[in-house]
Amino acid sequence: MPTPTDVTVERAEDGDVLVRVKVSFRRNSGKTSILVPEEGGADYGSPLARTFAKAMSWRAALERGDYPSAKDMAAACDRDPSQFRHLLNLAFLSPRIVEAVLTGRGLPPGGLSLNRLLRIRSLVWSEQEREAGIRPDLADAGA
């Protein structure tokens, strides 16, 4: 498992959440790969982790005002607006859920699927964690 210094979750005074993940990048034949620490069982390059990263970058672009609306950004990204808004919801999930997905700690038996995460409707982090089945005893270890 990654050590606590490999993944950190910080909450700023303004309410923003910053998830830091220690990674290295390797370029091979024009393709960039994300490398994680040797002892890590986490998969930061997994499709779910990449989807989280995409959603968080979309949220940041919208908050910066790069696009006037989610609909305009969806069009610029050549995405269906409904699908775009659905995926954008991932950027509002609890930091403990994000950390659990990235590190593998605190996940429910069988893990978490994108479909299960997209069904979470609450904006309250503790309710999201309950709906996702995050085990608080293990999820707290890295927070």
Image: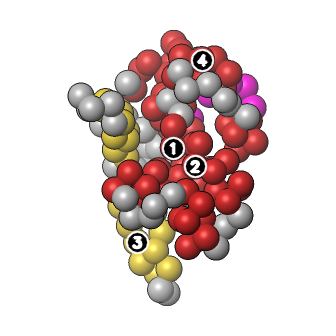
At which x and y percent is residue 105? 53, 29
| Residue type at numbered disc 2 | Leu
Question: Are there few (<14), some (14-19), or many (20+) residues within 10 Å of tag 1?
Answer: many
The vertical placement of 108 against 17, above or below, is above
Mark identifier at residue 26: 3
Q: Choose top left, top right, bottom left or bottom right for residue 64.
A: bottom left
Going 63% across and 51% down the picture, which residue do you hit?
Answer: 85
Question: In the image as oriented, which residue stretches furthest toward the top?
Answer: 137
> Element type at marker 3?
strand
| Residue type at numbered disc 1 | Ala
Nearest the viewer among 8 and 39 is 8
User: In the rendered structure, which disc, 3 or 2, sits on the residue that comes first in sequence?
Assistant: 3
Q: Which residue is mark 2?
A: 88
Question: Are there few (<14), some (14-19), or many (20+) residues within 10 Å of tag 4?
Answer: some
Q: Is residue 106 visible?
A: no
Label 3, label 4: how far apart the Cα atoms are: 38 Å
Q: In the rendered image, which quarter contains the C terminus?
A: top left
Mark identifier at residue 91: 1
Which is more foreground, mark 3 or mark 2?
2
> Element type at marker 4?
helix
The residue segment tinted magenta is 104-110
At which x and y percent is residue 44? 51, 52
Nearest the viewer among 72 and 29 is 72
Horizontally, residue 51 falls left or right of residue 36, namely: right
| Residue type at numbered disc 3 | Arg
How many numbered discs?
A: 4
